[in-house]
């Protein structure tokens, strides 16, 4: 009787674990998508800030020349 109760508890715990693993798998895919999205944002910000820096250097050089 005691073993039967333990087996039932083990079975319930395994079902919970299976559910949690399924949810974790879905969340891992979402985190992967977020990572790609953030990478794109960082690359875009780097491009914009780099262009501003180049434009800023160009304006300081042209003001020095005049």
Image (tube, helix red, strand yellow):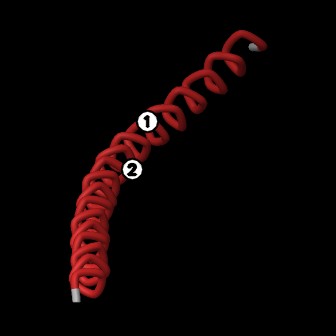
**In the drawing, what numbered circle is on residue 27?**
2
Residue occupying image coordinates x 22% and y 66%: 47
Q: Closer to the camera, 50 or 14?
A: 50
Among the 4 quarters of the image, the one containing residue 12: top right
Q: In this rendering, would 58 be left or right of 35? A: left
Q: Position of residue 36 (x, y in %)?
A: 25, 53
Which residue sits at x=32%, y=61%?
A: 42
Q: In which quarter of the image is the C terminus?
A: bottom left
- In the figure, residue 43 lies in which quadrant? bottom left
Identify the residue under disc 1: 21
Of tags 2 and 1, which is closer to the observer?
2
SS under mark 2: helix
Q: Position of residue 31 (x, y in %)?
A: 37, 51
Question: Which residue: 70% across, 17% down?
Answer: 6
> Vertically, is 36 above or below 50?
above
Q: Which residue is pictured at 43% across the width and 42% down the height?
A: 24
Question: Could you tell me residue 37's position as x and y percent?
Answer: 27, 61
Q: Residue 10, relative to residue 46: is it above or below?
A: above
Lower sequence index among marks 2 and 1 = 1
Mark-to-mark CA distance, 2 and 1: 10 Å
Percent position of residue 58, x then y: 22, 76
Give the camera-side residue of 63 and 20.
63
Is 20 left or right of 2, judged from the image as shown? left
Q: Quick check: marks 2 and 1 in contact, CB under 8 Å?
A: no
């Amino acid at each position: 009787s005691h073993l039967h109760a333990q087996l039932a508890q083990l079975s319930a715990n395994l079902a919970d674990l299976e559910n949690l693993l399924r949810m974790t798998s879905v969340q891992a895919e979402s985190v992967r998508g977020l990572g790609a999205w953030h990478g794109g944002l960082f690359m875009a910000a780097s491009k914009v800030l780099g262009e501003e820096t180049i434009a800023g250097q160009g304006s300081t050089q042209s003001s020095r020349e005049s």
